[in-house]
Image (spheres, rainbow, N blue to C red):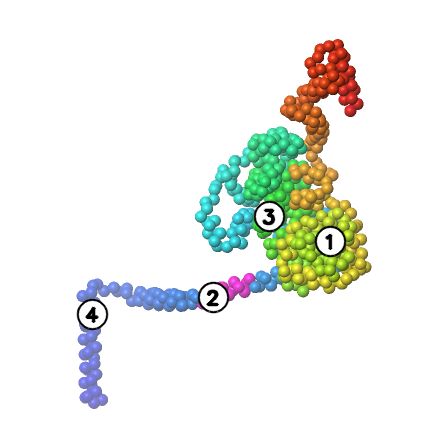
Amino acid sequence: MSTKHLKKLMEEKKVEVEEEEQSESEEEVGGPINRFAMLNMGDEEEGKNESEEEEEEVKREQKGDNAAKKKKKNNKKNKKKANQKKKVEEDPFDLEKRDEENFDDEIDSPISLSQLTEACESAENLFKFDSKMIDPMVELRKSIGKAFRMEGRTQEVVRGQARKSRYVVTKHWPLFKKGGLSMEIALKRDAVTYFKFVHGTDYRNIEKLMRMGELTHNPELVNEAFMVNPYHLNSLLIRANTAFMQEDVSVAMEMLCMGIYGTECASHALFNLSSWNHRLDYNQFENRAIFLILHRYIFFLERRRSFNTALNYAKLLFSLDPVKDPVGTMLLMDSLALKARQYEWLNKVYEQGKTWKNLHLLPNWQYSIALAAFHTQDETADEKLLHALTAFPSVFVAIANAIQLNFDPATASRRALTPAYTALEPSGVQLLSSLYARQTELLWKNPAVLAWAEKIVTSIGSDYGSRMIDEEAKEKRLSRFAAIPPQIKRCLFLSDIPLQESTTLTDPFPPKQSKCDYDRELSDTGSTVAQESVLARFLHSLYPSFDESEGIGEGLARAMEGAREWARGALGGGGGGGGGEGAGGDEEVEIEIDEEDEGR
């Protein structure tokens, strides 16, 4: 090795030694030496690395946040699409997978509860009551728009003394006191429990007072019953009807809401009004009030154009007794579903209801299914309407009359559309046609719907009503609608369709198997009141100043005295004469009148 290289190495070593001495001096100046610092150097390096990795992860998350949100939205959309596909694919009542079944021709064929459950497995979901859809004002705000919604927010909701309800929007109502109304378990059958309301002594007295007022057409007695118990159900029903006749729909609806609230408060602790397995027997008189109140409330909601809310309450009413359907709720659901644009729900109910409610035999469902198919652009719409026109041509005539549609001469000449042909239809078909035409006249006024219906009617041909298939359909109508079932009568009466038979609002067309303790008492009282009213009218005709508050006995005595005075004047005995002839004339007249009265 040369000297030059040795010198370079020595100089490099000196520089290294000097640097080490400088570093040691700096450590002594900074403080004592940490002899265990080398042990923690690895941990500190790991901590630094972890912190750096965390910062990098945060930056990556911030950068990919938007992308993640987009992925979540896409995943939600994909899930919704998948669920919709599953719903479309799932059809537990696919008719093609089932064997052909022979349906009974009767509208209300008897069916057991087990058969009902087997035939309609998802009925509980179809007719499930939504407790969030009880306020008709919410639906009205949604239909009108933001302007009405903003206006509604400025209004303060008045909280009354009544507690919050699951079925109605409570207002400033008085506190509920049972007043003799209670509920108990009547029967348990399989998974279904039947309940019944019970009238105590106080409630029975108010019920008698109310029914006396209804029988004598005395609203003061009904108001007195309401003042004693503001939650007396039948009094609320009558007062609501009176308010509706006076065109005060808001007051009428509030009366019925109070009735629903009173029913909820008086119910059994285990009873759930919206439960599919909790039922009420309409044959029990005490249970009928809630059926009538709900049916009438649906009628008022439809007038207020709250169709979704009305359909929600119709589900609640139907679930109280889906086997018998005592107030004909099925005659309302189809039109409400059409107005609420629940076409898919309507088709599901129809397909399932054909087995256990014979919906394919009712005229309103035939036309509603066809109209729903038209709105959903179903290819079978023409075929369904053609079938409905063949089975029930009088319904289309009633719709045309309701919307004031004038047929052209060629269409009017068809036999099935003539007034003479329609007049020969059974009374049940005519009444159901009138009900359906009034419920759906606005739907059929749509120009597109009218053009479609006229096209189908024209396609039938000029022999419409004279074909063999028309004659067969006519024979089926005559056999099936020879008599009107009582539940259809109740639905027509509660829907303000005029009937030839007279009945009462609180008990329209009572069932033959009625369980009512008031029948005997009311029949005796009613006959007495009827006789007194006839005598009162007779005495008023004889004695114009007669007042019923005097009593029949005093009124009869005064009328007899007036008759004697009139007889004296007619016989010339003088009004105040006291002679012998006058006395003799009084006795003869008195005897004649007594004999005539006894003869009567």
Q: Which mark is residue 303?
A: 3
Say which amino acid is labelled 4.
Glu
Q: Which mark is residue 24?
A: 4
202 or 485, which lies in front?
485
On screen, residue 328 above or below 53: above
Say which amino acid is labelled 2.
Lys
Q: Earlier in the sequence, mark 1 or mark 3?
A: 3
Residue 525 seen by the camera: no
Say which amino acid is labelled 1.
Ser
The residue that mark 1 highlights is 394
Q: Secondary structure at mark 1?
A: helix
- Real-space CA distance between mark 4 and mark 1, rounded to the nearest whole angstrom: 114 Å
Sort mark 3 into few (<14), some (14-19) or many (20+) by Cα contacts within 10 Å: few
**Which residue is at a point 73% across and 49% down the rendered structure image?**
430
The residue that mark 2 highlights is 70
**Which residue is at a point 53% across and 48% down the rendered structure image?**
137
**Region in magenta:** 67-80
The x, y position of residue 68, in whole percent, is 46, 66
Say which amino acid is labelled 3.
Arg
Q: Earlier in the sequence, mark 2 or mark 4?
A: 4
Q: Earlier in the sequence, mark 4 or mark 1?
A: 4
Residue 498, located in which quarter of the rendered image? top right
Q: Secondary structure at mark 2?
A: helix
